[in-house]
Image: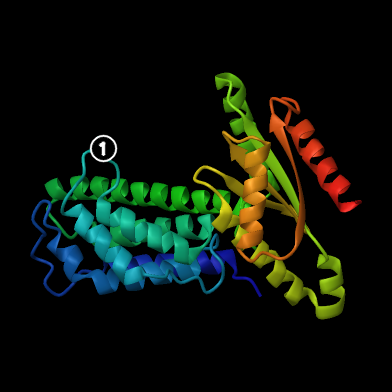
Amino acid sequence: MGRDPDEGDREAVAISARAVAAPEDSGSAAPAGGLTTLVAQLPQVVSTWEELCLWDPLLPPESCPLMANELAGAVAGALDRPQPLGWGPDPEIERVTEDFAVVTGSVDIAVGQLVCLREALRLHLQGKMAVADEAESLCRMGMVIDRAIGVAVRRLSTRLEEEAYIDSLTGLLNRRALGRDLERELGRAIRYGRPLAVMVADLDGLKVVNDTQGHPAGDERLRAMAHGLTNALRMGDQAYRIGGDEFVVVLPEAVAETAEAVAKRVEGAGSPIFTWGASCYPDDGDRLDVLIDTADHRLLAKRSR
């Protein structure tokens, strides 16, 4: 059953009341920039942060920030060494927040939990230091959290983009990445008048292996093919698995003889048996689809012999 939003609001008010309760030694205020009170209260800050995450209606039920102590400590440290705006995030905040984002695994959850951390820090800073220092410290704290949110969003967005271009089974780039990269390499070849080769390779007998030995055995053959391609390529070449048993290799600064040499190196690397065909710019055309189709037709011609 989901949480009642009204109940969450009431609990958040209760958390705020507990957090702002004055400590026994309320007469001492943190010096400007020192934030001694915050450092001394880090366990309470973390506890408040965890409670706020637990009751935030925008976070999943039972949400609890991972790396809470490390991240809260990094924020406290960053407040004692403020970065000018043009310098970007504090290096330690950047390192810890990137790790926090990765283990959290979700942009929405990471941002939501950092917003709760900002509120927990505000509750523990407000009223605990000289008035002249409080406004500056709260402003700096907000900037630190804003930059941490930026780091988390950037890290997770980069990760999602990387995953969108990677074939999870083999670790090679996928069809989407092929379209992006081949367009770039073909444009470069046309602009500078340089050759470009495209090789299409099909793993032979994969369906028979899947039917007789099971899909795990077929997956192993696909990974072995990917391993052979990776080991055989030159610097600047790139291999892709574009679906099923089909692979493509983009070879900048290459001609037909280069593709044949690469195929022999793949075979020599212990790859499963495969059939391949290649096409080249400028001899076979200057369009992506034409180069892929031409290489595919030559592959099929070899297979039909």
Q: Choose between 255 and 191: the one closer to the eye.
A: 255
Residue at position x 39%, y 50% in the image: 151
* Extreme residue in the bottom direction: 213
Image x and y of residue 252, in percent: 58, 36
User: Mark 1 belongs to which amino acid?
Assistant: Leu
Image x and y of residue 205, in percent: 83, 66
Local packing at callout 1 (Cα closer than 10 Å; few below 14, some 14-19, many 20+) is few
* Extreme residue in the right direction: 304
Image x and y of residue 88, in percent: 29, 42
| Vertical side of 97 occupied by 296: above or below | above
Residue 239 in view here:
yes
Residue at position x 41%, y 70% in the image: 66
Residue at position x 20%, y 53% in the image: 79
Query: Exactly how many numbered labels are in the figure?
Result: 1
Residue 10 in view here:
no
Colouring of the image: rainbow
| Vertical side of 234 occupied by 43: above or below | below
| Vertical side of 249 occupied by 205: above or below | below
Q: Is residue 189 left or right of residue 26?
A: right
Q: Choose between 272 and 67: the one closer to the eye.
A: 272
* Residue bearing the label numbered 1: 85
Residue at position x 49%, y 45% in the image: 235
Secondary structure under tag 1 reads helix
Question: Image quadrant of residue 191?
Answer: top right
The quadrant in which the N terminus is found is bottom right
Image x and y of residue 157, in percent: 52, 49
